[in-house]
Image (cartoon, rainbow, N blue to C red):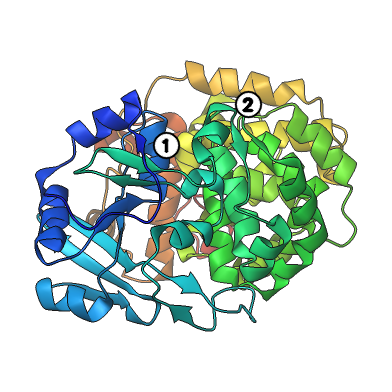
Amino acid sequence: MLGNEADIEGLPLTDKMTSFVDCLPSDISEVLNHIASNGGGAWIVGGAVRDAAMGIVPSDIDLATDLRPEQLLKIFPTAIKTGVAFGTVTVKSGDYLIQTTTLRVDGEYHDARRPDSVEYNLSLKQDLQRRDFTINAMAIDVARRLYYDPNNGIHDIENCVIRSVGNPYKRINEDALRILRAFRFLGQLEAAKWRLEEQLYDAISECSYLIDDLSRERIWQELHKILRSDTTCEILISMINTDVLPIVFDWGRVDRSKLISALRERPNLDYAALFVLLNYQLDQSGLNQLCKSLKLSKKHTKEILSTSEKARIIPTDEPAYLRLYRHLSGERYQSILRLAEVLCRHNMVEKLSHMDAKYYRQIIVAIRKLPPLSNPEQLIDGNWLMAITNIKQGEKLGRLKEWMYRLQIENDWSTITEVERCLASIHWQSDDFESWPKMRLV
């Protein structure tokens, strides 16, 4: 159903956009039609148009409309008031939650984060002009099968360039998060050939200090995505050269040349190992404080601290130890050992300075050759152990149970009989249980 026309000349859909529109879910079409039937116009905008232009199926679809928030809430009674002050409601349709925002222009920015006010002027052209990057400043009219691109974003997609809409210094001063978003898009587009436009790169370098004004949670949200991209090493080098990472992590005495040299090798590290590498100078306490300051979840903090601890341990090549190492590290053992290799080769950790970096590759190979454990779950429980030993519930029983589990993993036991044989051969009757081995590598 045709809705209101845009105030800008449209272009015929590209082949890739046509494929996207032809496969548009009916739940989305119903929302567009409902807006049109109530006297409005609606356009798909932002990342969905960018992805469609690249032949990527969008994960989220956002709409811009010339209906005001109160009108949207009237015709969509179940809509969520996500950001009514800024013209945004979230419309439910089938399995979709569609963020729908009234066409607007932004007022002045005084906190490098959000406009002090917005004005609904109902101009698609001006709405697209307020957006961050040209590749995100396009719109599609589904019914008319036209797309709108006043900032030539399709040209930048074809040339793999991330460019600001208008003056990059102004855009960054409006919202400093755009600095991190620019780098995140480099990784999200998953192509090493993408680059930041020169003026945008210079603006990021000169305005990187504005990152200090951002909330730490939002910094981590963007950084976490960057650390998980396929081209993360190249991106991190740019973030070092533009002073972005030194500000994010509040680097003091850090040898940037070492880090850049290590990153140029493109080590295959997961996000936690990269986080530790970028902050190699910090001990466990310092890393923990950094995680707290960035408001990391308990899960992320635990993975980062565990990675740092294990990467500084020099493993033996004994099969029993390697079985324990693999069990305690899980599938991440390779990333941890590759991190240790990098720290060693670039002389970043004094404890590893005497090691041959090749040794860690040998350990990875040795672990790969180990067969899977017969039973990774503990064979015995506390009740069984109390019945066998007559030890009452308490710390001693817990420590003995932990010791048995460690021996089970090291020796790859598969039956309770093997645990019983072990109990008959060790001196568990002693009260010196604090010296018993724990389920840890050191």
User: To which quarter of the image does residue 234 belong?
Assistant: top right
> In terms of sequence position, does the residue under pointer 2 or pointer 1 come before the other?
2
* Most foreground residue, 78 or 435: 78
Q: Is residue 80 in view?
A: yes
Q: Is residue 298 left or right of residue 239?
A: left
Q: Give, as a three-letter code, the residue at label 2.
A: Lys
Residue hosting label 2: 193
Identity of the residue drawn at 81% across and 38% down: 260
Q: CA distance from mark 2 to mark 1?
A: 46 Å
* Most foreground residue, 325 or 162: 162
Q: Position of residue 263 (x, y in %)?
A: 74, 34
User: To which quarter of the image does residue 113 belong?
Assistant: bottom right
User: To which quarter of the image does residue 81 belong?
Assistant: bottom left
Mark 2 vs mark 1: give the one in front: 2
Q: Give, as a three-letter code, the residue at label 1.
A: Ile
Q: Position of residue 80 (x, y in %)?
A: 22, 74
Count the labels in the image: 2
Does dot 2 land on a helix, a strand or a loop?
Answer: loop
Q: Position of residue 250 (x, y in %)?
A: 78, 65
Q: Residues within 10 Å of mark 2 (few under 14, many from 20)?
A: few
Is 45 drawn above or below residue 386 in the view shown?
above
Is 404 drawn above or below residue 63 in the view shown?
above
Is 101 drawn above or below residue 407 in the view shown?
below
Residue hosting label 1: 409
Q: Position of residue 272 (x, y in %)?
A: 58, 48
* Most foreground residue, 299 or 9: 9
Does dot 1 land on a helix, a strand or a loop?
Answer: helix
* Most foreground residue, 222 or 172: 172
